[in-house]
């Protein structure tokens, strides 16, 4: 049954790839018939210049999302080609650049580069149709702003919509996830970034018309600037994230019972949030909130309580109930901290029925991140040895989660956590992830502290 399903899926993927290639060939034929290339010395020089610019932009390929999706500024020569030398030449530029990029540069298998090149040919064709239909006239001699800019903008939109739809559709088929989920995850922020820098393509065409081919290479300067600033930004974000993990790991490393706890809770929370199909940004905020959820326990007084086998005194209970507020107080010192992260820290001990602390919020009044962390935190607490009991089995944890739905836990979060296999594969994956972080950051685990 499983094998049959995999075969059916592979077959569906093959069909999608094949349909895209066939559609691209048909559309390219139509473009060449309707708008045949005008081959002159000038148009060939322009073609060469745009190819040079395109190869350079391709080499600037960079990653702008943490989900690993690669975007590129290589659409700039493609759109520039539509403005200057027309749809047919724009398709020639597309084929040369994409075949170079996917075969020579990235050495992708045939079906991948054929699909990628085909979907990009479809996007460039759609952009060309919109440009010409709405009054745009490709020209190397003049570029009238009022006549050409509105159709150029429509062409930009057509290009990105076709491109994003094709990519999102094929990912949704291969990952067996709804189109809308992948769209939110992948397309949203990519389109914003791409559309924001698309006027660069217009600038390239304008430079060419006004001052000739050599000045087009000036467009390389803002491209390098963009590449650099974006690269730095992503690296800084990653560094912040890594530093935060080191900090939390180091704080928790002093106590065997909390060692690795927040990293595991963060990993589980992230996976539950992803299964709940929350936006990429919210998933990241919840992951960070989960990483910091117990930062209020930084005081040594808390490790004594954690190691204590007997019941807590009223004073100790008050101290425990104060840790979310203490956490928020500490983290609030970071000026740029997102409010949603603070909410996660503040409310991760609220119960769904309103009997938790510190605010006694109930149901959906509790922020979604805090409801997720409550489940992830409890799973981790149950799955680790404590001074007063051994770790529970996966079956026992599952039963506890189900029994406490609607009282301690949000039933939806529990359902997603159980359906998403958060319990089943937790051991291997989480331990691997924590070990990787430890190796990566060279933080050595502390030896187990004796229980007094
Ligand atoms: Fe806590």
Image (cartoon, rainbow, N blue to C red):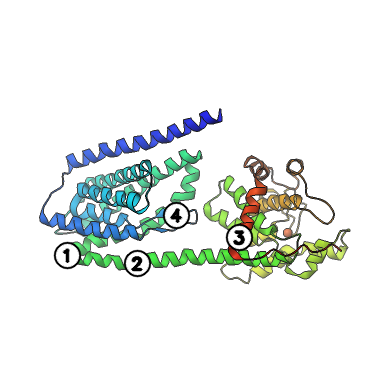
397 displayed left or right of 217: right
Give how far apart the Cα atoms at labels 1 and 2 are: 21 Å
N-term-proximal mark, 1 vs 2: 1
Q: Position of residue 303 (x, y in %)?
A: 78, 65
N-term-proximal mark, 4 vs 3: 4
Label pair 3/2, CB-CB below 8 angstroms: no
The tag on residue 212 is: 1
In the picture of the structure, the residue carrying the numbered disc 4 is: 189
Give how far apart the Cα atoms at labels 3 and 2 are: 32 Å
Q: Nearer the viewer, mark 4 or mark 2?
A: 2
Q: Nearer the viewer, mark 1 or mark 2?
A: 2
N-term-proximal mark, 1 vs 3: 1
In the picture of the structure, the residue carrying the numbered disc 2 is: 224
N-term-proximal mark, 3 vs 2: 2
Label pair 1/2, CB-CB below 8 angstroms: no
**Within the image, what quadrant is residue 264 found in?**
bottom right
Give how far apart the Cα atoms at labels 4 and 2 are: 21 Å
Give how far apart the Cα atoms at labels 1 and 3 are: 52 Å
The residue sitting at 40% across, 53% down in the picture is 191
Q: Residues within 10 Å of mark 1 (few under 14, many from 20)?
A: some
Query: Is disc 2 placed on a helix, strand or loop?
Result: helix
In the picture of the structure, the residue carrying the numbered disc 3 is: 437
Q: Nearer the viewer, mark 4 or mark 3?
A: 3
Residue 445 visible, this angle: yes
């Amino acid at each position: 049954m499983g094998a049959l399903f995999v075969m059916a899926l592979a077959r569906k993927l093959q069909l999608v790839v094949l349909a895209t290639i066939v559609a691209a060939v048909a559309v390219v034929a139509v473009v060449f018939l309707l708008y045949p290339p005008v081959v002159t010395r000038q148009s060939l020089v322009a073609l060469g210049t745009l190819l040079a610019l395109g190869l350079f932009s391709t080499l600037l390929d960079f990653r702008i999302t943490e989900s690993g999706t690669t975007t590129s500024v290589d659409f700039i020569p493609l759109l520039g080609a539509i403005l200057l030398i027309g749809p047919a030449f724009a398709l020639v530029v597309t084929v040369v650049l994409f075949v170079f990029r996917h075969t020579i540069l990235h050495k992708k298998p045939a079906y991948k580069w054929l699909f990628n090149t085909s979907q990009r040919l479809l996007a460039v064709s759609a952009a060309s149709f919109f440009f010409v239909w709405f009054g745009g006239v490709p020209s190397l001699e003049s570029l009238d702003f009022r006549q050409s800019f509105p159709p150029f903008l429509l062409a930009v939109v057509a290009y990105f919509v076709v491109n994003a739809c094709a990519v999102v559709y094929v990912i949704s088929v291969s990952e067996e996830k709804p189109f809308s989920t992948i769209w939110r995850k992948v397309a949203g922020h990519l389109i914003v970034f791409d559309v924001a820098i698309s006027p660069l393509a217009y600038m390239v065409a304008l430079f060419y018309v006004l001052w000739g081919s050599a000045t087009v290479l000036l467009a390389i300067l803002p491209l390098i600037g963009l590449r650099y600033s974006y690269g730095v930004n992503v690296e800084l974000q990653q560094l912040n994230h890594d530093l935060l993990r080191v900090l939390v790991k180091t704080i928790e490393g002093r106590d065997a019972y909390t060692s690795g706890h927040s990293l595991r809770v963060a990993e589980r929370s992230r996976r539950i949030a992803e299964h709940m199909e929350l936006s990429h940004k919210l998933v990241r905020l919840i992951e960070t909130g989960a990483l910091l959820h117990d930062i209020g326990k930084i005081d040594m007084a808390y490790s004594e309580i954690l190691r204590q086998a007997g019941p807590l005194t009223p004073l100790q209970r008050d101290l425990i109930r104060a840790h979310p507020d203490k956490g928020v107080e500490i983290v609030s010192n970071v000026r740029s901290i997102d409010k949603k992260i603070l909410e996660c820290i503040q409310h991760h001990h609220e119960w769904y029925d309103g009997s938790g602390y510190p605010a006694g919020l109930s149901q959906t009044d509790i922020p979604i991140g805090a409801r997720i962390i409550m489940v992830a935190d409890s799973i981790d607490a149950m799955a680790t040895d404590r001074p007063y009991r051994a770790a529970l089995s996966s079956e026992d944890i599952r039963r506890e989660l189900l029994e406490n739905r609607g009282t301690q836990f949000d039933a939806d979060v529990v359902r997603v956590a159980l359906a998403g296999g958060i319990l089943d594969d937790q051991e291997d994956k989480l331990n691997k992830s924590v070990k990787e972080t430890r190796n990566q950051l060279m933080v050595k685990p502390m030896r187990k502290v004796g229980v007094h």
